Amino acid sequence: MKNLLSKQVVILLPEQSARFKNTLALETTTPKKFSLPVVVSILMTVVPLVTTSILTAWAINHENVLRNLPFQWWLGVTFILTLASSAALTPPTFLALVYGYFLGWSALPMLFGLNLGAIAIIYVSAHFLHASSVREYLIQIYPQVGSLLRKFYKNELRLIFFAKLSPVLPFAITNLFFAMAGARFKQVLAGGTMGMIPRTVLAVWAGKEAQDIRYLLEHPNEGLATKIILIVLIIVSTLGIGYFFRDKTMVE
């Protein structure tokens, strides 16, 4: 009997050791794939606050330079800012205020191009963050993520539209989230376009009506009409996103 127990212990110990090693390897290797998107998301939230402050100070001190900048130069600047916006360095809504102040309504085509270009760059960049590996890892650890993603795939356009409609959700973060979630590129572009139009038009209008760039950039939401429209956009966006998570008949 003792010999039999000894043999069982000898057999079980290597199995337990192998299982422990596999578990340890999974815990030490897999999170590394997940940590990169998390770090990128944090940077995309913090960095715009710093760059916006720097750009605000520069624009205030160089208003005459921007005022006399040829239209062709604005096109080149827009291309550079498209790259910057895709890297979460310059929030498009902030840029719309500046463009509206200096160019008025003629800035809308450039701003729409800037938004779409930045969305496309972020979508392509998600491939280098191992989006599919991140999704597989999350589904293994949190099975409910798989159900949520299936619901999302059935209502991509609607959810993307309401998320992009909100003036409080960070531009780069939302685009990265949808790309990492596996949203189709056409749906991201379509939903992003429809959602960004009200916010961009509002920002350009606020910039166009402003009399002083310092006051505009330091108080971007000044004015009763602007505040009302912002509140409406936030409410509509929140209700739309909340409806996605609550209405089972729509998403199942």
Image: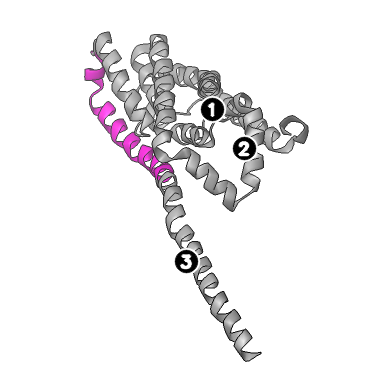
Front-most of 70 and 211? 70
Q: Is residue 105 left or right of residue 58?
A: right
Tell me if mark 1 has few (under 14), some (14-19) or many (20+) residues whose alpha carbon lies within 10 angstroms of its own: many
The circle on residue 21 is 3
Question: In this image, 56 relative to 18: left or right?
Answer: left
Q: State which quarter of the image contains the N terminus.
A: bottom right
User: On residue 164, which mark appears?
Assistant: 1
The amino acid on which the numbered mark 2 sits, given as a three-letter code, is Leu
Whole-percent x, y for residue 160 in the image: 57, 28
Q: Is residue 192 above or below residue 107?
A: below
Q: Residues within 10 Å of mark 3 (few under 14, many from 20)?
A: few
Identify the magenta region: 40-68
**Residue 149: which disc?**
2
Earlier residue among tags 1 and 3 = 3
Amino acid type of disc 1? Answer: Lys
Front-most of residues 239 and 122:
122
In the image shown, does 171 or 185 lie closer to the viewer? 185
Q: Which residue is drawn at 43% across and 48% down?
A: 33
Residue 80 picture location, percent across and down: 29, 23
Q: Distance between the residues labelled 2 and 1?
A: 18 Å
Q: Is the magenta stretch mostly helix, strand or loop?
A: helix
